[in-house]
Image: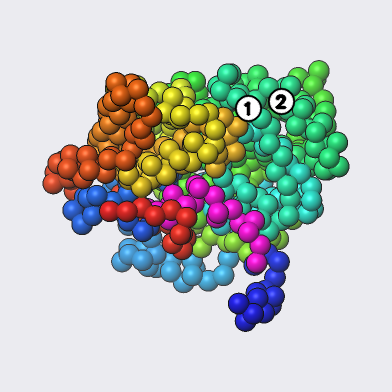
Amino acid sequence: MVILREKKSLLSKIATSDQHGENSPYFDGWKAYDQDPFHPTQNPHGVIQMGLAENQLSHDLIERWIVENPKSSICTDVGVDLFKDIANFQDYHGMPEFREAIAKFMGKARGDRVRFDPDRIVMGGGATGASESLMFCLADPGDGFLVPTPYYPAFDRDLRWRTGIQLIPIVCKSSNDFKITKQALESAYDNAIKSNIKIKGLIIANPSNPLGTTMDRETLKTLIKFINDKDIHLVCDEIYAATVFNTPDFISISEVLQEMEQDPMNRINPELVHIIYSLSKDMGLPGFRVGILYSYNDGVVSSARKMSSFGLISTQTQHFLASILSDEVFVESFLIENSRRLAKRHKVFTQGLEEDGITCLASNAALYVWMDLRRLLKKPTFDEEMRLWRLIINEVKLNVSPGSSFHCVEPGWFRVCFANMDEQTVQIALNRIHIFVKKGKENETTTTKNKRSRPWSKDLRLSFSSRLYDETTMMSPRIMSPHSPFAHSPLVQART
């Protein structure tokens, strides 16, 4: 122990801190999956990964385009002529054709109702890198940003771990479908000021993670007025902008800003508005690590470009994406078909849950649902939520994410991803849920008859091992999603 402490003292405060956020149940669920990953033939009793917001429904469309357009890659016979030019060092501002293609695609993803300037696009290593760079540009250690709850757990890592900023929750509740209110905004801001926290901005995710909902025009106008009144920044995470599969349509902050600027009655400062974007969700390319910071502030663009040298996108990736995103016919058809497939999957999954009496918050976007399991809690406490979550992980063998890891103030909500697997895996997951709920009802009935309390999960494993996996022989032999990059955790033990 003495040696361990001495070694630890040689490291930096960041290296030895626990502020990364990996101790969250959100990440523990990924670790549980890593220890016992589901596979249709090699491990049919394993944990199904439903905590990863990944879109695997439309990869075939991109694969087909690649086959038909081999010149888009410098690693093909017909594209190798460009190898020398692409392989050499490029300006960290980004290749002009890449920035132009990204700007055009961002407009297309927002219904072509607003244009984006290629010269305002700054590259980052995924939305994670782009978001952190923006925090470094806007704030100093100790400064605070308001963020509505529930919010993406990795914000704690992406936005504050290395920057030292604080995230101040704006409490939103299910009574109004977790929408942001002016009263909640003012309350969070005032409380922060009373605590001597300097508020530098407001951060939102639209479409929402984890709610899967989009913000309406009036709410966005309220937010713009609020940040202008307080003279603070507005950071809009719009990485799901084109991952919308039902009405209402997505409305970008850029569109609302444009409208408000045209009204002489509004005193709006566009330099306070910044957008985070990526191709991880809308194109299903998280492994490409394409993050974009788009700012209406010249100082932020200049500073962020200097920082971007720490997280550049490879020129080979830029070249490929410039090619595919410049194909307007393909982009149009891809967005339409991807939306159709997401709508179908969302309908199948939510209707499957409804058959067991499980409802979700009405949603129209993203790759997950906000599932309501409050009625399954013995008491409305977060201890009970964690007890239920461990049961779902260890016995039902589904990695779903508890609402407390998203800073939700109401226990019993869970985020469940539905687009990172094939149809057969979805049916296996729904079947596991069906058996779980049925077993719970049987135990409740037994408890009532015997007039005594009895835990309704003790013999759940027996029913699962004998009944759950009849369909696995029909499935294609592939793993539905990659492992997470985290080490195994002793906090969660997913058992076979």
Label 2 SS = helix
Q: Which residues are magenta?
A: 16-33
Give the residue pinned by disc 1: 172
Q: Is residue 172 left or right of residue 249?
A: right
Magenta segment: does it hold 268? no
Q: How is the image coloured?
A: rainbow
Quadrant of res 58: top left
Q: Is residue 22 magenta?
A: yes
Pointer 1: residues within 10 angstroms few (<14), some, or many (20+)?
A: many
Q: Is residue 26 above or below residue 241?
A: below
Quadrant where the N terminus lies? bottom right
Give the structural element (helix, strand or loop) at label 1. Answer: loop
Which residue lies under the disc numbered 2? Answer: 184
Q: From what the image shows, is residue 380 above or below residue 3?
A: above
**Is residue 437 something that shows in the picture?**
no
Q: Residue at x 54, y 59 (%)?
A: 313
Give the percent coordinates (x, y) of residue 443: 30, 29
**Nearer the N terminus, badge 2 or badge 1?**
1
Q: CA distance from mark 2 to mark 1?
A: 7 Å
Q: Position of residue 400 (x, y in %)?
A: 41, 41
In this rendering, position of residue 71 left or right of residue 12: left
The quadrant in which residue 55 appears is top left
**Residue at figure coordinates x 20%, y 57% from the top left:** 42
Q: Are marks 2 and 1 in contact (CB under 8 Å)?
A: yes
In depth, the one of 421 and 386 nearer the eye is 386
